[in-house]
Image (cartoon, helix red, strand yellow):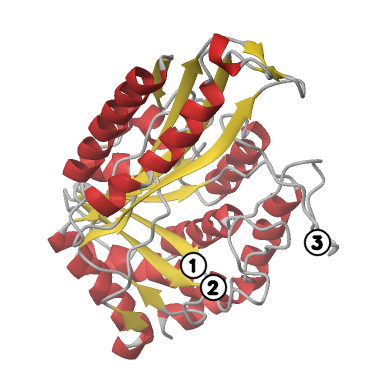
């Protein structure tokens, strides 16, 4: 019996786990009940379980044979602050929170793999199953690493996956190099001189300065970044003023930038600072510029050559070469698994969730994980373990 056929037998169980997690979503560093549920299942499979890294993280360990090699497999646990608009039986019970990115499915697939491997330990080495909190903008991976993740659970390689829309259901996409973009946020406080709207010459207009700065920031990608490098700079918030007939004393701009090259990431930050300083001088205002004021920025998600080759081998063994896209277009989305890839060589791939027209669009209030791919994702993890730990 193939691994995929064997995992099909676990499909009803994985679907039950997935829908339970969907029903009770928890957001960053508050995944206490999620962690308790996952830890209980892992213990029931006979695995050694550790809780508390990254506040709510769970790590389970399974060893077989006499091999000294170890790998880590990671799934993210957290939900988003989105009000669910679905009406099925397993819809979110927590107002304003939902699993709109499929982390419930990621956990269920890794749980399925852990159960299968505990019953069929046909490998030679150690597997660490990492269930990570706070992927959505709060860098739970970084926190787990800071708490000693790879000191307590040494691994030669680390692997992650994410469901992805508009990749055929159950297919895979993966490449070496940049897979997901770096993410940084910025906040600019422009301080001017308030005055009557009829007497603008008596003040310094922070709104006009902000408008010019917004336009200037759009030239960073078009005139500073090499056209062969992809990057995007976006202003996402503007806050100023309280009434009709007064020019306010301040304007706040917030935004984000993303790219695939760490050098470009540094260059964009330098250029933002330069444009802020020039705008202040031109419009007689002052400014405070803060990068990543609330959450840490995310580095580029970069797949290493050797682990990616192993991931491709496992995925191809499972679904055939026609089911593995080796030249996907990298996503401007970001992923804090990048922090783990800075610590250990590894690979992050996408598993197809089907058409985005069928409730598979990420971060959407109508999203629901495609349960049909649960056995495929779990079988990939199993195939990867038996491929690496021989």
Disc 3 marks which residue? 86
The foreground one among 240 and 147 is: 240
**Gap between marks 2 and 1, in whole Å?**
5 Å
Which circle's residue, 2 or 1, is located before the other in the chain? 1
Determine which of the numbered discs, if any, sits on residue 164 in the image.
1
Residue in the picture at 18% in, 62% down: 228
**Gap between marks 2 and 3, in whole Å?**
18 Å
Query: Would you say 250 lies left or right of 159 here?
Result: right
In the rendered structure, are the residues bearing label 2 and label 1 in contact, judged by CB atoms less than 8 Å apart? Answer: yes
Q: Secondary structure at mark 2?
A: loop
Residue in the picture at 22% in, 36% down: 266
| Residue 49 in view here | no
Residue in the picture at 34% in, 71% down: 383
Which circle's residue, 2 or 3, is located before the other in the chain? 3
Q: Secondary structure at mark 3?
A: loop
**Gap between marks 1 and 3, in whole Å?**
19 Å
Disc 2 marks which residue? 353
Residue 199 at x, y = what percent?
A: 64, 15
Which circle's residue, 1 or 3, is located before the other in the chain? 3
């Amino acid at each position: 019996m193939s691994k995929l056929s064997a995992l099909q037998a676990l499909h009803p169980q994985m679907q039950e786990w997935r829908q339970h997690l969907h029903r009770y979503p928890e957001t960053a560093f508050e995944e206490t009940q999620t962690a308790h549920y996952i830890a209980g299942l892992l213990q029931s499979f006979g695995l050694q379980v550790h809780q508390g890294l990254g506040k709510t993280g769970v790590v389970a360990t399974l060893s077989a044979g006499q091999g000294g090699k170890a790998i880590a497999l990671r799934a993210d646990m957290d939900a988003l602050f989105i009000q669910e608009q679905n009406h099925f039986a397993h819809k979110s019970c927590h107002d304003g929170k939902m699993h709109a990115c499929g982390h419930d499915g990621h956990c269920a697939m890794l749980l399925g793999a852990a159960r299968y491997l505990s019953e069929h330990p046909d490998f030679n080495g150690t597997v660490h199953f990492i269930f990570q909190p706070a992927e959505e903008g709060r860098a739970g991976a970084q926190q787990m690493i800071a708490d000693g993740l790879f000191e307590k659970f040494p691994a030669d390689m680390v692997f992650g996956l994410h469901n992805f829309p508009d990749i055929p259901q159950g297919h895979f996409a993966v490449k070496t190099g940049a897979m997901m973009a770096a993410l940084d946020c910025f906040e600019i406080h422009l301080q001017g001189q308030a005055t009557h709207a009829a007497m603008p010459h008596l003040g310094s207009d922070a709104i006009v300065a902000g408008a010019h700065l917004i336009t200037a920031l759009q030239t960073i990608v078009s005139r500073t970044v090499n056209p062969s490098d992809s990057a995007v700079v976006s202003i996402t918030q503007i806050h100023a003023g309280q009434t009709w007939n007064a020019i306010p004393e301040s304007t706040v701009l917030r935004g984000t930038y993303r790219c695939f090259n760490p050098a470009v990431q540094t260059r964009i930050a330098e250029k933002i600072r330069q444009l802020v300083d020039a705008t202040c001088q031109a419009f007689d205002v002052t400014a405070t510029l803060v990068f990543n004021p609330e959450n840490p920025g995310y580095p580029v998600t970069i797949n290493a050559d050797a682990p990616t080759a192993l991931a491709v081998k496992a995925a191809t063994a499972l679904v055939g070469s026609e089911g593995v896209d080796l030249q996907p277009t990298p996503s401007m989305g970001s992923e804090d698994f990048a922090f783990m890839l800075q610590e250990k060589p590894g690979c992050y791939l996408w598993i197809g969730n089907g058409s985005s027209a069928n409730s598979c669009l990420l971060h959407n209030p109508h999203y629901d994980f495609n349960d049909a791919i649960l056995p495929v994702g779990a079988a990939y993890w199993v195939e990867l373990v038996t491929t690496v730990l021989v």
